[in-house]
DNA sequence: GGTATATCGATTTTTATATATCGATATACA
DNA sequence: TGTATATCGATATATAAAAATCGATATACC
């Protein structure tokens, strides 16, 4: 992780700004002010300005930001234009769902293979993506320059898979198993626990 | 949202503690100290203590916490024992994947129905769960006392679905569409954007 | 039973984040 | 062309979270 001097919270808001801007009716807003973005997203206008100025240039008084420029600045800052390749380990329920998920493209990510340790599972193809035996992960990553991986295996295998990924040169991991993974400081790990997150918000209901 | 005086960041760590404790080898650790939890999860020991004391009772010097008691305290605090009913709106790729996902049970949530507006989709059953026409959502929620909903529809329909949910009495919503939803203050909304999250961590790779 | 020590809990300090206020600037409009 | 105003950027304040420090307690061990 680098690029400090931009807060983590801000980093998480940038995609929100971007998708908001992209969802604006085409051509209707050639320019947009930080104030109106803030209003639409229920945020403070100062915060929006600060966030945008951190990632992009600054807007112009009276008119605000040029919408198209702002969109491409954000996309470029978030690196949505790069087409990085991604692999998924674990082709069970969750893994297959992710193989079928079509949201990765829009953020410049391209899932090109999946891996599993079950002979009943690998060798097949899901939604046009080949499922390979886990033993091939290292050579595959080396050949294809893979840096990004998704862990979608049961809890007990997650650390093992993590180790294999790191050994294969992967340095950014999204982990769907509800366990804490250990890896070197140069590896960026993000844990996703959909069920736990849903349970948290559900606490609010009586 | 209530239960202030416990930080949001802490609330997000509690499930991590819980799954860590549950993954401990059975019977091997009748007691566990905040220090050792902290070490295992790469957190500060003070923070662990503070988090645990906020949610559960406090441990005892020299021995720490009774593992089983701690687990059930956390489960009860996080309300994992309640069996709340959940509905999903949108039975496309993501919706179906969520219908197939088996992680909700462990946190006390039970997906009992899905809704869609496409006649080609509703009327069928996916993984044992009926997909119903969206028009039935209000009566269904009323009959079954549904308070929790998941939005898995395309961007443009998300706000409309959100409104319908709120109108149907739902007050906790997990939203997978990358748009900002507006709802009353009594409605708790959590946005999940898997692709954007993956893109964020991918920024770290060179 | 006494003592050393690992652990806890409370208080303080530091850091990070969000909010509010102020002045400056460039644009729209008269 | 001049002025009013909406918008920006910077600085300062307030809040929230994390880290560090300190003293107290109960347990294990002698």
Image (cartoon, coloured by chain):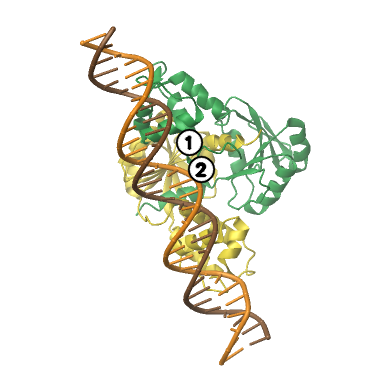
Chain colours: A green, B yellow, C orange, D brown
Quarter occupied by residue A25: top left
> Dot 1 surroundings within 10 Å: few (below 14), some, or many (20 or more)?
many
Is A181 on the left or on the right of D4, as rendered? Answer: right
Q: Considering depth in this image, is A152 or B48 the residue closer to the camera?
A: B48
- The answer to whether residue B86 is above or below residue A125 is below
Residue D12 placement (x, y as % from top left):
37, 41
Question: Going 36% across and 52% down the picture, which residue do you hit?
Answer: A205
Question: Going 71% across and 43% down the picture, which residue do you hit?
Answer: A165
SS state under label 1: loop
Residue D11 placement (x, y as % from top left):
40, 37
Whether residue A150 is visible here, answered yes or no, is: yes
The chain holding disc 2 is B
Is B21 on the left or on the right of B187, as rendered? Answer: right
Mark found first going from the N terminus, 1 or 2:
1
Are the residues under badges 1 and 2 in a single subunit?
Answer: yes
> Dot 2 surroundings within 10 Å: few (below 14), some, or many (20 or more)?
many
Q: State yes or no: discs 1 and 2 in contact (Cβ < 8 Å).
A: yes
Quarter occupied by residue A117: top right
Q: Quadrant of the C terminus of chain B?
A: top right
The chain holding disc 1 is B
SS state under label 2: helix
- The answer to whether residue B204 is above or below residue C3 is above
- The answer to whether residue A166 is above or below residue A145 is below
Whether residue B126 is visible here, answered yes or no, is: no
Check residue B20 in the rendering and tell me which mark sits there, or answer none: none
**Which residue bears the numbered disc 2?**
B99
Q: CA distance from mark 1 to mark 2?
A: 8 Å
**Which residue bears the numbered disc 1?**
B91
Quarter occupied by residue C18: top left
Total residue callouts: 2
């Amino acid at each position: 992780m680098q690029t400090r001097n931009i807060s983590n919270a801000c980093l998480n808001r940038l995609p929100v700004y971007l998708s908001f801007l992209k969802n604006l009716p085409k051509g209707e807003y050639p320019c947009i002010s930080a104030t109106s973005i803030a209003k639409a997203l229920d945020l403070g206008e100062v915060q929006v300005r600060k966030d945008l100025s951190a990632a992009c240039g600054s807007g112009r008084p009276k008119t605000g930001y040029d919408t198209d420029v702002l969109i491409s600045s954000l996309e470029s800052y978030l690196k949505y234009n790069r087409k990085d390749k991604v692999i998924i380990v674990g082709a069970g329920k969750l893994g297959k769902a992710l193989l079928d998920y079509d949201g990765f493209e829009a953020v410049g990510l391209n899932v090109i293979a999946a891996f599993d340790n079950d002979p009943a599972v690998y060798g097949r193809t899901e939604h046009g993506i080949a499922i390979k035996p886990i033993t091939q992960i290292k050579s595959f990553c080396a050949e294809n320059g893979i840096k990004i991986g998704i862990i979608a295996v049961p809890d007990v295998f997650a650390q093992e898979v993590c180790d294999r990924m790191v050994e294969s040169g992967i340095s950014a991991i999204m982990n769907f198993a509800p366990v804490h993974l250990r890896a070197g400081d140069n590896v960026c790990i993000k844990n996703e626990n959909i069920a736990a997150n849903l349970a948290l918000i559900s606490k609010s209901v009586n």
